[in-house]
Image: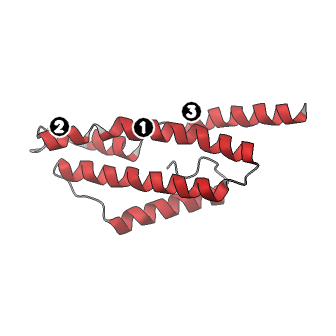
Amino acid sequence: MGNKIAWVGGCAASVLVVFLSGCASQTRNMAESISPHGPQYKDEVCQRSFELAPLHDDIKLTRSIATPTLLLLSGGSYLLPLLGVNMGLDALDHLDASHVSKACGGLGTSSENILEKVVLGAGFSLFTGNVKLGAN
């Protein structure tokens, strides 16, 4: 009975985390920040780059649900593999956000800055005990 209560509590906490964290990826945030009045906004390359946003939104939502669930079900033993996967997906999101910016005439983000954001985000998540790892 105690295990069922813990499992239900963990699932409820996971759902709460999803609703509190929002589902906008870095790529979505970048796409929405592009000015429609910019000279390259209507270019095909810029418009096609916006197609990356829904993919990263779906990945972020899936991570927000799957990571705490897998941590709960594994008793925490999957922490390091999940951290690695989430950091990789977070880096890909930042790289694609940088691509959207460049494709639409903006400045991209350097690889060093992306690495810094990903490492700091993962470290902050671990430090605060935030189980959605890398979903910043």
Disc number at residue 36? 2
Identity, as a three-letter code, of the amino acid under mark 3? Phe
Residue at position x 63%, y 34% in the image: 16
Q: Work out how far the residue at label 3 is from the one at label 2, CA to CA, in angstroms.
A: 29 Å
Residue 24, picture quadrant: top left
N-terminal of the pair, mark 3 or mark 2, is 3
Q: Position of residue 41 (x, y in %)?
A: 14, 41
> Contact (CB < 8 A) between labels 2 and 1?
no
Disc number at residue 19? 3
Q: Which structural element holds mark 2?
A: loop
Q: Which structural element holds mark 1?
A: helix
N-terminal of the pair, mark 2 or mark 1, is 2
Q: Is residue 24 visible?
A: no
Horizontally, residue 45 falls left or right of residue 91, namely left
Q: Which structural element holds mark 3?
A: helix
Q: Work out how far the residue at label 2 is from the one at label 1, CA to CA, in angstroms.
A: 21 Å
Q: Which residue is at the front of the view, 42 or 7? A: 7
Horizontally, residue 36 falls left or right of residue 28, namely left
Residue highlighted by disc 1: 57
Identity, as a three-letter code, of the amino acid under mark 2? Pro
Q: Work out how far the residue at label 1 is from the one at label 3, CA to CA, in angstroms.
A: 14 Å
Q: Position of residue 31 (x, y in %)?
A: 28, 41
Residue at position x 25%, y 58% in the image: 108
Q: Is residue 9 above or below residue 123?
A: above
Identity, as a three-letter code, of the amino acid under mark 1? Asp
Residue at position x 70%, y 31% in the image: 12
**Furthest residue in direction bottom, as rendered:** 112
Label 1: how many residues lie within 10 Å, few (<14), some (14-19) or many (20+)? many
